[in-house]
Image: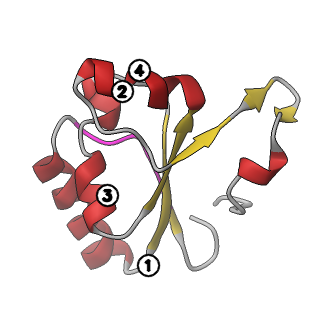
Amino acid sequence: RDGGRVLVVDTPWTDDQTAQILNWIKQEINLPVALAVVTHAHQDKMGGMDALHAAGIATYANALSNQLAPQEGLVAAQHSLTFAANGWVEPATAPNFGPLK
């Protein structure tokens, strides 16, 4: 979390499971989910994207993951990020979030 906001990393396999996690965050942490970052285009990481989008949560993934998602039957993130070993390649694409606790 970042002060009064939560960051979600990856989703479970399904939208229902993702909705359950979002409900748990609401009940137990009681902070808004500001954004979600998914690490790669597999069912166990991007399977709940529709649930995140339905909840109005901004989603981010590596550009290649977003390209591969539809080929894997998955919903792509709304935004693409480009990474480098020393930080963001395209800083304008990076969400403003952190430091994390």
Q: Nearer the viewer, mark 3 or mark 1?
A: 3
Q: Which callout, 2 or 3, points at the residue further toward the start of the chain?
A: 3
Q: Nearer the viewer, residue 101 or 56?
A: 56
Q: Viewed as shown, does residue 39 lie left or right of 55?
A: right
Q: Residues within 10 Å of mark 3 (few under 14, many from 20)?
A: many
Q: Which callout, 3 or 4, points at the residue further toward the start of the chain?
A: 3
Label 2: which residue? 69
Q: Nearer the viewer, residue 53 or 30?
A: 53
Q: Nearer the viewer, mark 1 or mark 4?
A: 4
Kind of residue at disc 1? Leu
Task: Tell me the number on the disc at residue 9.
Answer: none
Q: CA distance from mark 2 to mark 1?
A: 29 Å
Q: CA distance from mark 3 to mark 1?
A: 15 Å
Q: Secondary structure at mark 4?
A: helix
Q: CA distance from mark 2 to mark 3?
A: 15 Å
Q: Position of residue 73 (x, y in %)?
A: 22, 25
- The residue that appears at 17% across and 48% down in the rendered structure is 15
Q: CA distance from mark 4 to mark 2?
A: 4 Å
Label 3: which residue? 52
Q: Viewed as shown, does residue 1 lie left or right of 30?
A: right
Q: Which residues are magenta?
A: 7-12
Q: Are marks 4 and 2 in contact (CB under 8 Å)?
A: yes
Q: Position of residue 12 (x, y in %)?
A: 25, 39
Q: Position of residue 62 (x, y in %)?
A: 58, 31
Q: CA distance from mark 3 to mark 4?
A: 19 Å
